[in-house]
Image (spheres, grey):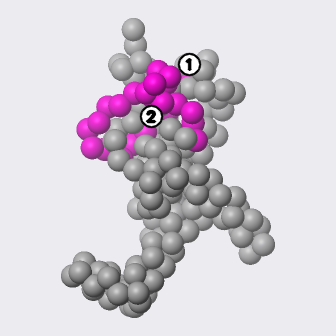
Amino acid sequence: MTSRSTDSILQGLKKTLDKIALFHGHYCPGIAYGLRVSLAGIKLMAASDNFELNVISGTTNCPLDAVQMITGCTVGNGKLFLDDRDRQEFTFWNHSQDKGIVIKPKKVFYRESIAEAEAMERFAEGDKSRETLRLVNARLQNKIESILLAEEKDAVEIEDINYKPDILKG
């Protein structure tokens, strides 16, 4: 991938992430993971609309807000089910195809700089100086970018399932 196309992809993902962050309340790696999970789920389930799709979330943490925004599946519309067992995994089920997948975010490798690591230590100890906050924010942005730009195989683990989840039966 060329640098120009990588920049274009990153800009598109960041615009989407901006909208998710407004809904969620802040930027964090969790919403970046949720975006990656959602994009993989929609692509692999090939749902033409969200009436065919259900999502079962194994967590109520940050990624869930991104999943709701990207898939359109919410608790309110009956397309999102919470099975909160504190597991970072999402089951996507396509009713018209009678098939599903489980997607789990993978920890994307990000090598922080020595300055970032030291700033995180200072921040944890209560240092809120301008320089410390600048480095902590840079670290956060770099980590989010590494999640957004990682190859799909490096960002998410995908498992096909050939059974309808119990929560969707009935």
Amino acid found under the numbered disc labelled 1: His
Q: Is residue 162 left or right of residue 124?
A: right
Residue 74 among magenta residues: yes
Q: Which region is colored magenta?
A: 70-94
Name the residue nearer the viewer: 170 or 158.
Answer: 170
Q: Quadrant of the C terminus?
A: top left
Number of other residues with Cα within 10 Å of mark 2, as a class: few under 14, some 14 to 19, many 20 or more:
many
Residue at image x 50%, y 42%?
A: 67
In 3D space, how far apart are the residues under numbered discs 2 and 1 (Cα atoms)?
A: 13 Å
Residue 26 picture location, percent across and down: 45, 59
Residue 161 visible in image: no
Residue 60 picture location, percent across and down: 34, 41
Q: Secondary structure at mark 1?
A: loop
Q: Is residue 37 left or right of residue 107?
A: right
Residue at image x 62%, y 61%?
A: 14
Mark count? 2
Residue ID for mark 1: 95
Q: Quadrant of the N terminus?
A: bottom right
Name the residue nearer the viewer: 67 or 154.
Answer: 67
User: Where is 133 relative to 83, above or below?
Assistant: below
Residue 125 got which mark? Answer: none
Q: Quadrant of residue 51?
A: top right
Residue ID for mark 2: 91
User: Where is 41 relative to 22, above or below?
Assistant: above
